Image (spheres, grey):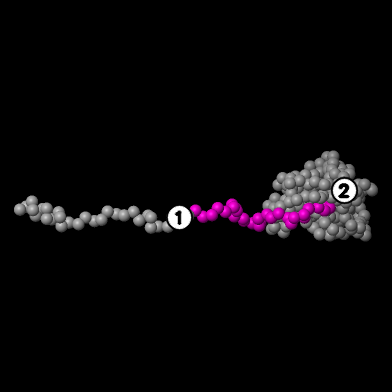
């Protein structure tokens, strides 16, 4: 009797159906179509090639070196553009041509601490020709005439030296700081990342009465300024423009 009861109970129990594999009901995942890798651009926009046939050419009106690159501003018949490439010795007034580059917009140069609205990066600077004799030197390239009274007497600054004294003592002053007060008689701004200023104070004879100063500060023709910087000697900028003595990296303070 017990056996029959157990069998009846076993027969009456229904097993749960075995779990079924439902994966076939799900859509098979598909790999998204391959796309070209495009890195996220931060800062300047991505470079684009110049228009076909648009060779980069022009006459150099400004050039500077920074961060292993040479930057040059070209004049193309009145239109200005910037190009940059491997560090190369370039001279203002040189003609460059037949370059093809990659355009960068809103390019920020941290070394130069400036942003270029548009600049082309090139692999080299081919097609250079000799610079015109009157256009090569950034320090003297200026269309501005010397102001009236260029050789008027200007008193020396406290603890400063006259222009003539700097010329006379250039050998011992090399690498040392000096202070010179004088009138701005010639200038050219923004060349090779610097402003180039010539000072006179009425001292010295012809050839030793003019002192070149490089600076980041801005002056105006005819200003009387006090320049504080370091003496450098025998500086050669190419194309026959060399300077026996000059003041580098000066600060300018108006009188």
Q: Which residue is mark 2?
A: 131
- Distance (Cα) linking label 1 and label 2: 66 Å
> Can residue 156 be seen in the rendering of this structure?
no
Q: Is residue 70 above or below residue 147?
A: above
Left or right? Give the position of 204 relative to 111.
right
Q: Quadrant of residue 185?
A: bottom right
Q: Which residue is mark 1?
A: 29
> Image point 77% across, 44% down: which residue?
88
Check if mark 1's residue and mark 2's residue have beta carbons within 8 Å.
no
Q: Quadrant of residue 187?
A: bottom right
Left or right? Give the position of 8 relative to 57.
left
* Label annotation for residue 124: none
> Image point 62% across, 56% down: which residue?
42
Camera-nearest residue between 243 and 153: 243
Q: Who comes first in sequence, dot 1 or dot 2?
A: 1
Find residue 141 and report its horizontal and vertical position in percent: 87, 53
* Identity of the residue furthest to the top in this view: 171
Find residue 198 and report its horizontal and vertical position in percent: 86, 52
> Image point 24% across, 56% down: which residue?
16
Numbered disc 1: secondary structure: loop
* Crowd tier of the residue under label 1, counting other residues whose Cα lies within 10 Å: few below 14, some 14–19, many 20 or above: few
The residue range painted magenta reads 31-60
* Identity of the residue furthest to the left in this view: 1
Q: Nearer the viewer, mark 1 or mark 2?
A: 1
Dominant SS type (magenta): loop
> Image point 34% across, 54% down: which residue?
21
The magenta stretch spans residue 59: yes
């Amino acid at each position: 009797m017990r056996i029959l009861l157990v069998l009846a109970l076993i027969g009456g129990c229904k097993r749960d159906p075995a779990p079924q594999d439902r994966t076939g009901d799900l859509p098979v995942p598909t790999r998204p179509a391959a796309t070209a890798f495009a890195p996220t651009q931060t800062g300047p926009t991505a470079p684009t090639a110049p228009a076909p046939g648009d060779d980069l050419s022009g006459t150099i009106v400004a050039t500077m070196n920074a961060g292993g690159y040479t930057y040059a501003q070209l004049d193309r018949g009145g239109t200005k553009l910037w190009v940059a490439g491997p560090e190369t010795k370039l001279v203002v007034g040189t003609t460059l041509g037949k370059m093809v580059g990659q355009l960068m917009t809103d390019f920020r140069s941290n070394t130069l601490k400036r942003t270029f609205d548009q600049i082309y990066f090139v692999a080299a600077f081919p097609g250079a020709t000799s610079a015109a004799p009157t256009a090569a030197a950034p320090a003297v390239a200026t269309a501005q005439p010397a102001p009236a009274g260029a050789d008027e007497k200007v008193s020396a600054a406290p603890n400063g030296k006259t222009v003539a004294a700097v010329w006379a003592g250039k050998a011992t002053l090399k690498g040392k700081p000096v202070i010179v007060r004088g009138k701005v008689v010639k200038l050219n701004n923004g060349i090779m990342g610097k402003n180039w200023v010539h000072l006179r104070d009425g001292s010295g004879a012809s050839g030793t009465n003019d002192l070149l100063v490089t600076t980041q500060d801005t002056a105006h023709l005819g200003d009387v300024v006090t320049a504080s910087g370091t003496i450098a000697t025998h500086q050669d900028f190419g194309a026959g423009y060399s300077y026996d003595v000059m003041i580098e990296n000066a600060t300018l303070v108006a009188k």
